[in-house]
């Protein structure tokens, strides 16, 4: 795996999908006279909103497991509209000594679209057809998966307007992280007076963090903002228009959709041989040409082309299921 893809995959899986072990930070002592409450998550209360836009910026700095200095800026932007039954997630990474890359996921009703600028710097759109089960899991991704159990302590201010929303301003007494074990933390949070959802969350923490795919000592600085409440519309980019659309059929039973590098992974409870046979029939029917196929029995690789678009498709055996990776080239 290329260095960039390795870090990108680890970071996305840890923050967006939440597959890594969740480590809870050591709580900061609440000042005398402070208030306390049960912990909030970034997703708390959002289910009652018709639409919203959220943006999370993360800055990681420190030394990786080999002692090498490293830093990365990671962005997660999320848009959701209940009325449209639509969801948009942008993930963007800028890392030391590596060109920036981005990946976008769109869900409109039962259709899932992937837009990537990874590797080549160009953009392309893939529509994953037959992705009903996978589409239902898109909403489990996003900034809300990065933090949990945000515990309020001292009330710092009341009736503060943040992003057009009336809020109460608190010091944070502790929080759960998805990116390592935190030793020290200093953070503040603004909570909507109506709905009790988090509007802004800022802070800095130090400890043992997952830096470049391995543990290292460093710091994590973040800023989360929620805006455009009940006023957000989700629109597909131009490259996902009907004329430029490229379809990738998904086999029945596809689930566990997640991001990995420049593509998507999902699993199917069937043998790799069956899934490979499905793709041999379904891909040409969707307009794809199979330029090359290789196999070693339980692993299959397909190089596919459709017009100017190219993807790689990999099928492997994992825990008795077929694991499929689709990568934009």
Image (cartoon, rainbow, N blue to C red):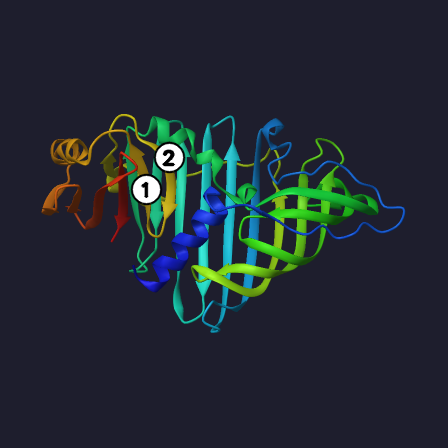
Asked if one can make out residue 186 in the rendered structure from this viewpoint, the answer is yes
Location of residue 31 with respect to 265 vertically, above or below: below
Q: Could you tell me how far apart the alpha carbons at marks 2 and 1 are, in whole angstroms? A: 8 Å
Q: In which quarter of the image is the N terminus?
A: bottom left
Q: Mark 1 points at which residue?
A: 265
Image position, residue 242 (x, y; %): 27, 36
Image position, residue 64 (x, y; %): 48, 67
Q: Which residue is drawn at 50% across and 48% down?
A: 15
* Most foreground residue, 147 or 115: 147
Seen as rendered, the residue at the extreme front is 319
Seen as rendered, the residue at the extreme bottom is 68
Q: For residue 95, what is the image quadrant?
A: bottom left
Location of residue 290 with respect to 48 vertically, above or below: below
Q: Is residue 255 left or right of residue 140?
A: left
Q: Residue at x 82, y 47 (%)?
A: 154
Q: In this view, does 105 lie to the left or right of 54?
A: left
- Tally the marks: 2
Image position, residue 226 (x, y; %): 62, 43
- Which numbered dot is residue 256? 2
Asked if one can make out residue 306 in the rendered structure from this viewpoint, the answer is no
Q: Residues within 10 Å of mark 1 (few under 14, many from 20)?
A: many
Which of marks 1 and 2 precedes in the sequence? 2
């Amino acid at each position: 795996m290329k260095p960039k893809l390795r870090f990108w995959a680890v970071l996305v899986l840890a923050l967006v999908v939440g597959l890594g072990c969740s480590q809870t930070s050591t709580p900061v002592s609440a000042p005398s006279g402070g208030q306390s409450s049960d912990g909030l998550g970034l997703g708390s209360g959002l289910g009652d909103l018709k639409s919203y836009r959220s943006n999370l910026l993360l800055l990681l700095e420190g030394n990786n497991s080999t002692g090498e200095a490293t830093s990365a800026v990671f962005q997660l932007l999320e848009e959701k509209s209940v009325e449209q039954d639509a969801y948009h997630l942008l993930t963007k990474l800028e890392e030391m000594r590596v060109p920036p890359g981005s990946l976008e996921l769109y869900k409109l009703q039962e259709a899932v679209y992937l837009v990537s600028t990874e590797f080549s710097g160009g953009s392309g759109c893939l529509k994953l057809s037959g992705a009903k089960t996978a589409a239902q899991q898109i909403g489990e991704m996003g900034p809300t998966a990065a933090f949990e159990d945000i515990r309020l302590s001292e009330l710092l201010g009341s009736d503060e307007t943040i992003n057009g929303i009336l809020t109460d301003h608190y010091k944070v007494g502790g929080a759960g992280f998805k990116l390592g074990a935190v030793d020290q933390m200093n953070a503040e949070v603004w909570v909507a007076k109506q709905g009790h959802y988090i509007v802004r969350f800022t802070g800095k923490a130090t400890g043992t963090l997952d830096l470049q795919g391995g543990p290292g000592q460093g710091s994590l600085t973040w800023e989360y903002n929620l805006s455009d409440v009940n006023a957000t519309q989700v629109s597909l980019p131009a490259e996902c228009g009907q004329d430029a659309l490229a379809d990738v059929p998904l086999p029945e039973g596809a689930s566990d959709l997640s991001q990995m590098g420049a593509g998507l992974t999902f699993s199917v409870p069937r043998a790799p041989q069956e899934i490979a046979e499905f793709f041999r029939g379904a891909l040409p029917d969707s307009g794809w040409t199979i330029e090359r196929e290789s196999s070693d029995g339980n692993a299959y690789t397909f190089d596919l082309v459709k017009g100017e678009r190219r993807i790689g498709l990999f099928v492997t055996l994992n825990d008795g299921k077929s694991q499929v990776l689709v990568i934009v080239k």
